[in-house]
Image: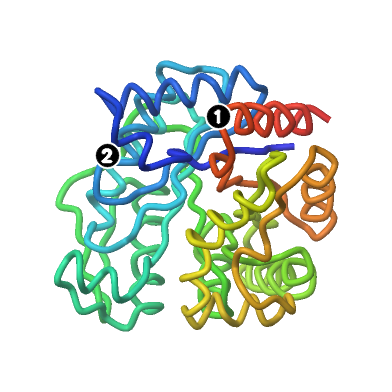
Amino acid sequence: MRIGVALPTDHTRLATESNSVEALIDQVRDLAAAGLTAAWLTQRLDHDAVTVAALAAREVPDIEIGTAVVPIYPRHPIALSMQAQTAQAASHGRFTLGVGMSVKAFVEQAYGITPHPRVRHLREFLEALHALFETGSVDLTGDTLVARSPFPGAVPGAAPRVPVLVAAAGELTLRAAGELADGALPILSGPRTLAEYTVPTLTRHAAAAGRPAPRIAAIVSGVVTADVEGARARIAQSMNPYGAIPAYRAALDREGLDQPADLAVVGDEQLLADQVAAYLEAGATELVYTQTATGSREDERRTWALLGELAKR
């Protein structure tokens, strides 16, 4: 069972480090020591997630590495292909590229980009990546994207082909993930939503496109801590703003929950183990844990130790 943790777990703490890249690699090393099977690098506006993934993979050979997720704005698929294939070669086949559209308002504010029709752009982006990873070249003129490689772009040693997962919650992004990628990173999807909507939708579209059964790396939130009230308050502050985004709101409504933080499990080891079991029973093929730093550092170590133990079962 592949269970991973999204890094950094605490952006505020990371900002106090003398070298944040070294600190992230140390965290990957700690995850491997705890028995976790994967480390996932998030992308904001500081370190580059794909670069750190490649470096961490070289330093820590006993763990899979990925991004969760790299926004497709403002990157071009040819540039991202170069980065991803380099990371795959550096990791000797242990890299997974997770991509997503990001929040529209953030894209407009941070990059000054007024996004094209977003799902159409996502589909064309995935088509370009698929061609580059499969053949080493691309010749695509779409409605939102032009990608033409004048010479080969394959990276020797980048094998197997870089797997691509798509951050998804609604019908259109799940369809893109099923038809054009290797699976999805479902966001704010609880066990009921996963079992009744996410997994059937994703699997149906993958099968119709003649693709293998998709990977379903569910992004989940949980922490082992005795400070239940304090941790819940911090998780609510972090997660609840996402409840206003329509696709995430729809996922919460399917689950019958009011706020994103209601998906998080906070408490003892048994509660977290039950959460892992519920997501696996719902059809997740792997889990990506967030919010593990909302307790103390000792709480986080306990959480990682438990997840590492569960990954071995």
Residue 174 vs residue 48, the one in the foreground: 48
Q: Quadrant of residue 86?
A: top left
| Label 1 neighbour load within 10 Å: few <14, some 14-19, many 20+ | few
- Counting from the top left corner in percent of width and height, residue 311 is at 74, 32
Q: Which residue is mark 2?
A: 47
- Counting from the top left corner in percent of width and height, residue 264 is at 67, 57
The reply, left or right, for residue 284 in relation to residue 128 is: right
Question: Which badge, 2 or 1, is on the more N-terminal residue?
Answer: 2
Q: Quadrant of residue 24?
A: top left
Residue 263 vs residue 168, the one in the foreground: 263
Q: Secondary structure at mark 2?
A: loop
- Position of the C terminus, as image quadrant, is top right
Looking at the rendered image, the disc whose residue lies closer to the viewer, 2 or 1, is 1
Q: Which mark is residue 297?
A: 1
The reply, left or right, for residue 249 in relation to residue 282 is: left
Q: Amino acid at mark 2?
A: His
- Residue at point 51% right, 71% down? 176
Q: Distance of mark 2 from mark 1, alpha carbons? A: 22 Å
